[in-house]
Image: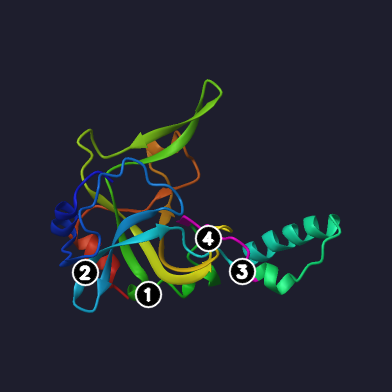
Amino acid sequence: MTKNVDAIRRLFGALNSKVGNLPSMPGIFPDYPAPIVRNAADGREIAMARWGMPSSQRALMDATKKRAERLEAKGKPVDFKELLRMEPDSGTTNIRNVNSAHWKRWLGPEHRCLVPFTSFSEYDTIDGKKVPVWFAPDASRPLLAFAGLRTNWTSVRKAKEGEVTADVFGFLTTEPNAEVKLVHPKAMPAILTTTEEYDLWLHAP
């Protein structure tokens, strides 16, 4: 995400900014903060949120069971309820199945956001090594947005950090186009490219 705050404000019609002078971000990684555009009481605003929506209860339960088994194998006592409460969840970055009961609570306009980007990467294996392959509409890397979901959530993101309450986001994926499919056949981010699409995503029922 290499465009500045003014570019984001102009393109997405954001009136307010809570991000200060946004530095160029040549790499954005899961569970790190990135700018999003969201609806607020007095219009759209730009805010920072951590990349990764809350994972499903089932995923956390499965991870906790594995942790409990490892502790029991070492002969250590296990308080499963407390272990589950403190299970680290760095978040789910991409949302593929919007029919899942887990995601339905966040599908309404109040939880939608735009995730500005200038290019995105998928990993490919070249000469036995995983390398990022970058995608953009053209060499100028114009500013676009992913269709995102957001919430404010209390959880343990990292064990050393403990329980925190944070603004978090993820974005939807869809069938890959011809270019992305060559590298990542499963899916690609859902990309919005026009003012009408931005408005529709943020407001339509």
* Disc sitting over residue 108 in the figure: 1
Residue type indicated by callout 4: Glu
Main secondary structure along the magenta-highlighted residues? loop
CA gap, disc 2 and disc 1: 16 Å
Task: Locate residue 44, reporting x and y percent.
Answer: 21, 69
Q: Which residues are magenta?
A: 85-95
- Residue 15: image quadrant is bottom left
| Front in this rendered view, residue 167 or 185 | 167
> Quick one: label 4, few (<14), some, or many (20+) residues within 10 Å?
few
CA gap, disc 3 and disc 4: 20 Å
Q: Which residue is mark 4?
A: 161
Does the magenta segment cover residue 91?
yes
The mark closer to the camera, 2 or 4, is 4
Residue type indicated by callout 1: Gly
Residue type indicated by callout 3: Gln
Task: Locate residue 192, reporting x and y percent.
Answer: 28, 55
CA gap, disc 2 and disc 3: 31 Å
Residue shown at 52% from the left, 20% from the top: 127
